[in-house]
Image (cartoon, rainbow, N blue to C red):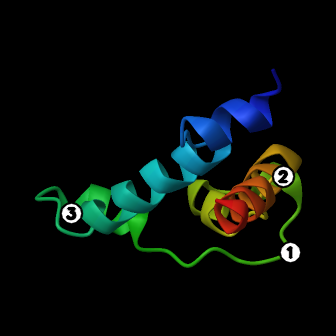
Amino acid sequence: MRNVDLHRDLDLHTIAQYMKSLSKTYFENAVRHPNPLVVEASTYTPVPDVEPKRRRPKHVLDDPDDKITTDNVSQQHTHTQHT
């Protein structure tokens, strides 16, 4: 059984989807954190097209999906259309 099938049949998120979701939640909640240093560290706007060594945590939110995630989403759409 392939990973794509497991993700589709069990409605599991890929690690990339899970990390992207966690990151989004973290940055949304960090704005309301009582420590001003946490708020300041989380309220930046990532610069697109920055070299890989200079990437910061918010860049993960703009990253394109990996091949497994893309395959999983396309498999879910075809699976739901046939059922």
Q: Residue 38 at x, y = what percent?
A: 29, 56
Of marks 2 and 1, the one in the foreground: 2
For the residue labelled by badge 3, is the local secondary structure a helix, a strand or a loop? helix
Asked whether, in this view, residue 46 is left or right of residue 74, the answer is left
For the residue labelled by badge 2, is the local secondary structure a helix, a strand or a loop? helix
Q: How many marks?
A: 3
Q: CA distance from mark 2 to mark 1?
A: 25 Å
- The residue pinned by badge 2 equals 71
Asked whether, in this view, residue 44 is left or right of residue 57, the answer is left
Residue pictured at 17% horizontal, 59% vertical: 33
Quadrant (top left, top right, bottom left, bottom right) of the N terminus: top right
Q: Residue 54 at x, y = what percent?
A: 77, 56
Q: CA distance from mark 3 to mark 2?
A: 41 Å
Q: Do the residues bearing badges 2 and 1 touch, measured as CB atoms within 8 Å?
A: no
Q: Earlier in the sequence, mark 3 or mark 1?
A: 3
Q: Is residue 59 visible?
A: yes
For the residue labelled by badge 1, is the local secondary structure a helix, a strand or a loop? loop
Residue pictured at 79% horizontal, 61% vertical: 74
Of marks 3 and 1, the one in the foreground: 1
Label 3 environment density (alpha carbons within 10 Å; few <14, some 14–19, many ≥20): few
Q: Quadrant of residue 58?
A: bottom right
Q: Is residue 15 visible?
A: no
Q: CA distance from mark 3 to mark 1?
A: 28 Å
Residue in the foreground of this view, choosing between 21 and 8: 8
Q: Earlier in the sequence, mark 2 or mark 1?
A: 1
Label 2 environment density (alpha carbons within 10 Å; few <14, some 14–19, many ≥20): some
- State the mark number for residue 49: 1
Q: Residue 62 at x, y = what percent?
A: 68, 69
- State the mark number for residue 36: 3
Q: Residue 20 at x, y = what percent?
A: 56, 54
- Disc 1 residue type (three-letter): Asp
- State the mark number for residue 22: none
